Amino acid sequence: MALNEVFESGTHLALACTDPTTPVSGDPVLIGQIPGVCTVSETADGLASVCTEGVWTLSVKGTNGSNAAIAAGDIVYYVTGNTPKLSVTTSGVRFGYALEAVNSGATTTIRVKLGY
């Protein structure tokens, strides 16, 4: 075994999130360009537990800058200035894949496969 291995899989990490900077458990998050979901809220040391794999139920908006429906299999992006953060607006950071549909202009909680 290599002596420089830090984590075997690297899917559950304690990290300082760049957006939001104080995440709550269940929030989609970014660490720079790395997408994740906060599993344990930020602690006093400024770190949150973040998972970088899996399928999560997350709030997604049917927009790409204007109203746009989302189909299962579409790429979902994280847009820092939007609420909710996830949509098909390609100016954001690639987050994962929609596993369910969202109607044009609607905000719906759907299953999202994290990563790409």
Image (cartoon, rainbow, N blue to C red):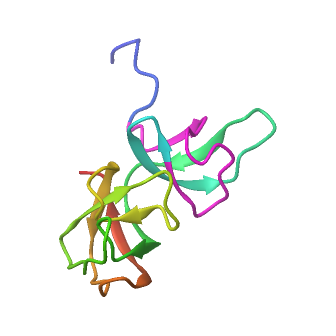
In magenta, the rendered stretch is: 9-29
Rendered location of residue 5, percent (x, y)? 40, 20
Rendered location of residue 94, percent (x, y)? 30, 50
Quadrant that contains the N terminus = top left
Q: Is residue 91 magenta?
A: no
**Does residue 21 lie above or below 70 as drawn?**
above
Q: Main secondary structure of the magenta part?
A: loop
Q: Residue at x 41, y 64 (%)?
A: 86
**Does residue 9 lie above or below 115 as drawn?**
above
Rendered location of residue 2, percent (x, y)? 34, 14
Rendered location of residue 81, percent (x, y)? 50, 54
**Does residue 4 lie above or below 103 as drawn?**
above
Q: Which residue reaches farthest top? A: 3
Left or right: 80 in relation to 101: right
Q: Which residue reaches farthest right? A: 44
Left or right: 1 in relation to 58: left
Q: Which residue reaches farthest front? A: 66
Q: Residue at x 77, y 32 (%)?
A: 45
Q: Residue at x 64, y 60 (%)?
A: 25
Q: Residue at x 49, y 61 (%)?
A: 82
Instruction: Tell how many labels.
Output: 0
- Image quadrant of residue 108? bottom left
Looking at the picture, tell me which residue is in the foreground, 77 or 48: 77
Left or right: 18 in relation to 35: right
Looking at the picture, tell me which residue is in the foreground, 61 or 28: 61
